[in-house]
Amino acid sequence: MFALKLDTVDSRRGKEAGVIIAIDGPSGAGKSTLAKRLARQLGYIYLDSGAMYRALALKLLRQGVDLTDDARMAEIVESTAIDLRESDGKLVVLLDGGDVAGEIRTPEVSQMASKSSALKVVRARLLELQRAVGKRGSVVAEGRDIGTVVFPQAEVKIFLDASTRERARRRYEELCAAGRPVAFDETLRELEERDKRDSERDLAPLCQADDALRIDSSNVDADAVAALVLDLVKNRAREINKIGVGFHG
Ligand code: DC
């Protein structure tokens, strides 16, 4: 069974539920940086939906599962536990009880997450878990289909984008900094491949919700993007009289 532990989540919530902030966009657009920052400043739950897809992908790779084997896929989805938690401000990704946060950012896992996330059996289960987290609001969720499918009712929707080259450059630097040197051209090629697959799949493809604000972060630094979105959240919360949007510096 998949399980998402909500104890840490509940302890972080104030008495009043705040809004849901949906951040979608392609890889390397700066979604994680923005989402983590907003969650910290607002005292909200940070829901990294990609980390869930990645954790499952890691298991599929470890077990050499054939994605076209429907029965095996259903069995794996049913028998895998994925928990997201937070420890000392860091995201802990528990796969069947073990923290795999340090293993899910490799190019192999990225590609497998992109491939397996196109499958109905995978999306259905993860969707259920993601919605459970959003039930009482006060969530910053990032992914590909948050504003379109997971939380179409989200009060604030951002579609964060950047040029393909800039996104590849960021991904390349991240991998190098993590001690995983790669060729830039290879990073660019893999990113383009993943963009194409994520946006052309039949189920919940990457696309901008009609009511999302599109921000191009190619030439804007993370501080400026965060300041812009925080303002937007404040205004939106005021507009709809939503309490629980506190700021924690
Ligand atoms: O955001 P990320 O790069 O960690 O996501 C890894 C893959 O997971 C991405 O290529 C597609 C899939 N994904 C998805 O299909 N839907 C989401 N909401 C989040 C991620």
Image (cartoon, rainbow, N blue to C red):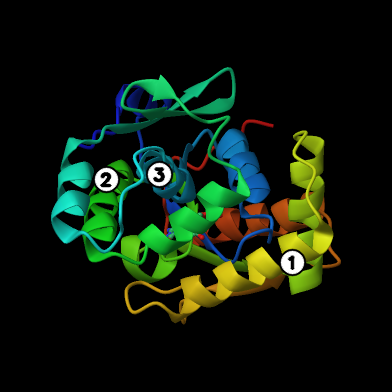
* Res. 227 in view: no
Does dot 1 land on a helix, a strand or a loop? helix
For marks 1 and 2 on the same chain, the one whose residue lies earlier in the sequence: 2
The answer to which of 203 and 197 lies nearer the viewer is 197
Verify CB contact (< 8 Å) between mark 2 and mark 3.
yes
Q: Amino acid at mark 1?
A: Leu
72 or 56: which is nearer to us?
A: 72
Q: Which residue is mark 1?
A: 188
Q: Amino acid at mark 2?
A: Leu
At 25% across and 36% down in the image, what residue appears? Answer: 80
Q: Is mark 3 within 8 Å of ligand 1?
A: yes
Q: Is residue 76 left or right of residue 233?
A: left
**Residue occupied by mark 3:** 52
Look at mark 2 in the image and give the residue it sits on: 129
Q: Residue at x 65, y 57 (%)?
A: 229
Query: Which residue is painted at 29% across and 50% down in the image?
Result: 126
Dot 1 and dot 2 residues touching (CB under 8 Å): no
Q: Is residue 10 above or below residue 217?
A: above
Quadrant including the C terminus? top right
**Residue 18 at what x, y percent from top left?**
41, 45
Along the polypeptide, which appears first: circle 1 or circle 3? 3
Q: Position of residue 77 (x, y in %)?
A: 22, 45
Nearest-to-viewer mark from 2 and 3 = 3
Check disc 3 and report its element: helix, strand or loop.
helix
Q: Position of residue 63 (x, y in %)?
A: 34, 39
Residue type beneath disc 3: Met
Residue shown at 55%/77% (left/top)?
196
